[in-house]
Image (spheres, rainbow, N blue to C red):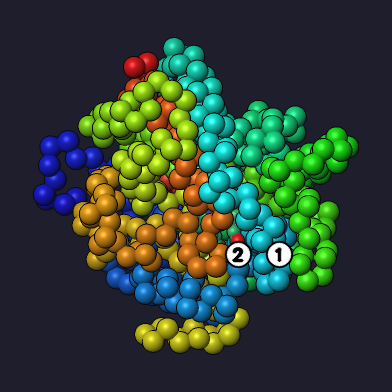
Amino acid sequence: MPDTLREGDFIPQTVTPPEKPLPLVRGLLQMIANPLHVWPRAMYENPYHGVRWIGRTFHYFRRPEHMKALFLDHADVFRKSQFQKKLVGPALGEGLLTSEGEHWKFQRRAASPAFRIDALRAIAPAFTSSAETAADRMIAAAARGPVDVMSEMQHATLDVIVETILGGADPDFGYNRIAGTVEDYMKTMGKPDMLDMFGAPTWIPRPWGGKGRRAASGLKQSAVNAIERRRASGETRNDLLGLLLAARDPETGRGLSEDELRDNVVTFIGAGHETTALALTFALYLIANAPEIQDRLVREAREVCGDSPIDAAMIDAMPFHEQVIKETMRLYPPVSIIDRVAAADIDFGDVHVKKGDFAFALIYIMHRHRRLWEQPERFDPDRFSEERAKGISRFQYMPFGAGPRICIGMKFAYMEAIAILATLVRRLRFLPNADHKVEPNIRITLRPEGGMPLFVGRR
Ligand code: HEM
């Protein structure tokens, strides 16, 4: 802990890294349980290491210059790795997140209009209305004790994304139906598999994957149902599904195949709600424990929005809300590792990557690296004030990735998170829960073990 802490500073809980690297077998078992328990303290202090394992090098990067080389300068050399495909592929198939090359380019072009600023400004009311409903639910639940704000935020962001993609509530994608399915998937498919770590071929049966595979096929069937309902309605709408249905490749004139349509509905619903929900979950935990910061948020929300529903212009006028969201994603990046595989030999100057090697961008570690951040374990949203943010390099803070595969929903996520946070703090007070230990765990996304029960009161 830094020795210059001031009164009121908050050091949020996380996993304490081991002092030394773990022995091999324990390390592998812990990697499956939670990689944060494997990475030793030294990794937060030095810039890089590589490990030879079954004939290839696994490169572990956490230096901004390496991130630039990986995601921008040599983006064409690095492909999505089989680890990512193994983790998310069964659910997301060949959608935008997982596809490559021309296939990816076409889908990215088709979806882009839904993420232009004018389209995002138009959906801002959906952010506020889902947050108001979440606040009502939380007030009702608070009478019974601590409220799990993680499930509340997942509910709120699912409502928003379903509205954005499908143009309204959908019987297949209601929260009560989807929540258990996503949970089952994350707990089974969403973590590394011992057989994969030893390079075992995919045809070897993995009986423990059954629940996850059923969850994936349930999600796919829901997407097919939603697409069929849209077609049967005969309506042409301008929501994301409407754009995907209408998309034509300018060169070939072809549209998205049925599988691509289905995979993109699942991709956008999955990628578009879980991550933002986690950013909000950790933000509520942080402000519950930092009352001064919570008060500043309340003041800003009241000054800018009064009691009115929050619109796009108000979102733009709340920089401190954005700072809190940014600092939350520094400490708890919803996507904590981004991995790639090299399609050719490439030289980074100080690191040589060979064709077939794996590259892991350790976002969580980079965001808490001792050489990059002052008092990295301290919650300090003012790091992202206009003045101080000038000292943060583009590739040192990467919650949304970087380069051509940067998150298509980045602006969407910021707008949504700011609108939901402001709506909640105007009405509710978040208070710490000393009985709950906060332990983030990497399972595709960075989730708090056991949810996030907090005390909630009316303002
Ligand atoms: C706080 C919220 C979010 C975080 C932290 C986040 C993070 C990321 C990251 C790190 C990537 C890059 C993955 C890689 O390079 O392998 C990504 C890609 C992507 N994200 Fe997000 N995301 C968020 C919200 C959203 C939202 C709201 C949507 C949709 C509405 C979305 C849809 C996608 C899609 C479709 C991709 C794949 C883009 C491509 O490969 O062209 N994300 N996201």
Helix, strand or loop at mark 1: helix
- Image quarter for ligand 1 equals bottom right
Residue beneath the point at 34% across and 58% down = 367
Q: Quadrant of residue 374?
A: bottom left
Query: What's the amino acid at mark 1?
Result: Phe
Residue beneath the point at 33% across and 42% down = 319
The first of marks 1 and 2 along the sequence is 2
Where does residue 293 sit, x and y in percent of width and height? 26, 35
Residue 308 visible from this viewpoint: yes
**Tag 1 and tag 2, C-beta contact below 8 Å:** no
Query: What's the amino acid at mark 2?
Result: Phe
Name the residue that disc number 2 marks. 83
Where does residue 147 sit, x and y in percent of width and height? 45, 23
Q: Out of 188 and 219, give the one closest to the viewer.
A: 219
Say which of marks 1 and 2 sits in front.
1
Residue beneath the point at 53% across and 49% down = 117
Helix, strand or loop at mark 2: helix
Left or right? Give the position of 209 relative to 6.
right
Name the residue that disc number 1 marks. 106
Where does residue 285 sit, x and y in percent of width and height? 36, 35
Q: Quadrant of the C terminus?
A: top left
Rendered image: mark on residue 416? none
